[in-house]
Amino acid sequence: MAAPLPPDYFARQDDSDDALFYLQPRKVVHIDDDAIKALTDQFAHILPTGGVYLDLMSSWRSHLPESLKPARVIGLGMNGDEMTDNPQLSKHVVQNLNTSPALPFEDASFDAAVCTVSVQYLTRPVEVFREVSRVLKPDAPFVVSFSNRCFPTKAVAVWQATSDQQHMALVVRYFEDAGGWKDITAWAFPGNKKWIGTSDPLFIVWAKRA
């Protein structure tokens, strides 16, 4: 078993109370339309139809395909106003996972979990991944997606210092260190070519509850 990642990997430029940073709603999407489509398509392939989903570090959009027809989607995030405006959430919980990584749900409560473009802000990721494993049913997937964007003052140091490919390896490491996971899979969408440059890339790492 590898040694735990050192605490200084999870230092941040702005270590003030996260509640202050997320006090004002930010009702914008953090990846472009092509990356959102790629994410939605992957959700359609990975997530079970008609299940109860946990949207971790949720916001005002979840990007879930309508074809999945979830029974319920529970959001957990930092801004209640954003989650209130999310049409796909059945209910939501305001919680800072960096100060309280324990999830307020019973064991084996969910058929799937997602964490969309937010994993870079977790200062206690292994504890959170362990908690997600606890609240998922056996074989349920946890889908972690991210791009090359972030709020730099709130992203942890190891994220700031590493490349896109290294970010994928880091999230794989979170799953491995947390335990309770199997079939860890990584996938990348490099972005579509535009007249100038390319659209946003998208990276996904997911695993199933063992």
Image (cartoon, grey):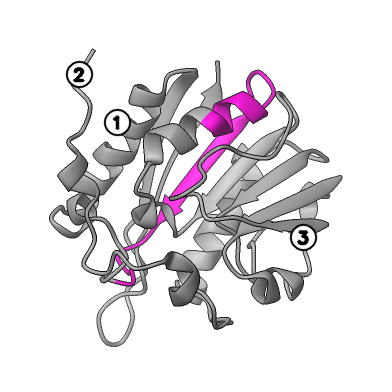
Residue at 67% from the left image edge and 45% from the top image edge: 54
**Helix or strand or loop: what does disc 2 sit on?**
loop
Decide which of tag 1 and tag 3 comes sooner along the chain: 3
Decide which of tag 2 and tag 1 comes sooner along the chain: 2
Which residue is under mark 2? 2
Would you say 92 lies left or right of 16 here? right
Q: What's the distance in space between the residues labelled 3 and 2, CA to CA?
A: 37 Å
Amino acid of disc 3: Leu
Residue at 40% from the left image edge and 25% from the top image edge: 178
Residue sitting farthest toward the top: 1
> Which percent across, then down, holds residue 41?
59, 54
Which residue is under mark 1? 173
Q: Do the residues labelled 1 and 3 touch (CB within 8 Å)?
A: no
Rendered view: 15 above or below 25: above
Q: Quadrant of the N terminus?
A: top left
Viewer-nearest of discs 2 and 1:
2
> Which percent across, then down, holds residue 160?
19, 60
| Nearer to the camera, 97 or 198 | 97
Rendered view: 174 above or below 70: above
Residue sitting farthest toward the right: 71
Amino acid of disc 2: Ala
Which residue is under mark 3? 89
Residue at 17% from the left image edge and 36% from the top image edge: 6
> Which percent across, then down, holds residue 5?
20, 33
Q: What stretch is highlighted in magenta?
A: 131-151
